[in-house]
Image: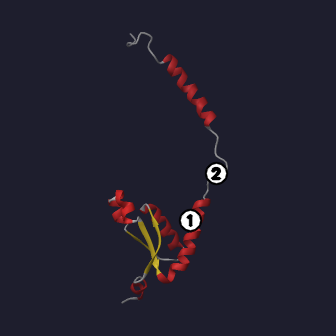
Amino acid sequence: MSEAAANWEIMKLLATFPSSEEAHLCRAFLESRGVEAVLLDEHITQMFWHYTQAFGGVRLVVAEEDWDTAAELYGEYMAALRDGPFPVEPVRAWPLVVLASLCVGLPLLLFGRHRNGGPRP
């Protein structure tokens, strides 16, 4: 048996994800940091998406000897997702949207109707 195959005899679950897209992003993050990871049940959850909760989602597993490093990297990954590049203050654009809607919609409302209810000659 090769050394690579021997490393994957004992795998430990690192995380579960509701979709394969999220799992692939995390796996790519781990592999970019040098930790090899494998996704399990990703095809089943894509084919039978309504059973995702029954299957437990897409499982991300790593070799047992890499689990400590992977757990630290997973914590870093989730912290980066929580902190994210979100705006500090929400954009307050609703006055502009209301004004634009009135400018465009009010003339159509007033002048877009036929007075007699029928087609114009």
Disc 1 element: helix
Q: Nearer the viewer, residue 62 or 33?
A: 62
The residue at 44%/13% (across/down) is 114
Is residue 104 shown left or right of residue 113?
A: right
Q: Nearer the viewer, residue 104 or 66?
A: 66
Report which residue position mark 2 lands on. 87
In the rendered view, would you say 11 is above or below 91?
below
Q: Nearer the viewer, residue 103 or 95?
A: 95
Type of amino acid at the residue the image marks with label 1: Met
Is residue 67 shown left or right of residue 3?
A: right
Report which residue position mark 1 lands on. 78
Type of amino acid at the residue the image marks with label 2: Pro
The residue at 42%/63% (across/down) is 20
Q: Position of residue 41 (x, y in %)?
A: 37, 68
The residue at 61%/36% (across/down) is 94
* Residue 99's disc number: none
**Residue 47 occupies quadrant:** bottom left
Viewport quadrant of the C terminus: top left
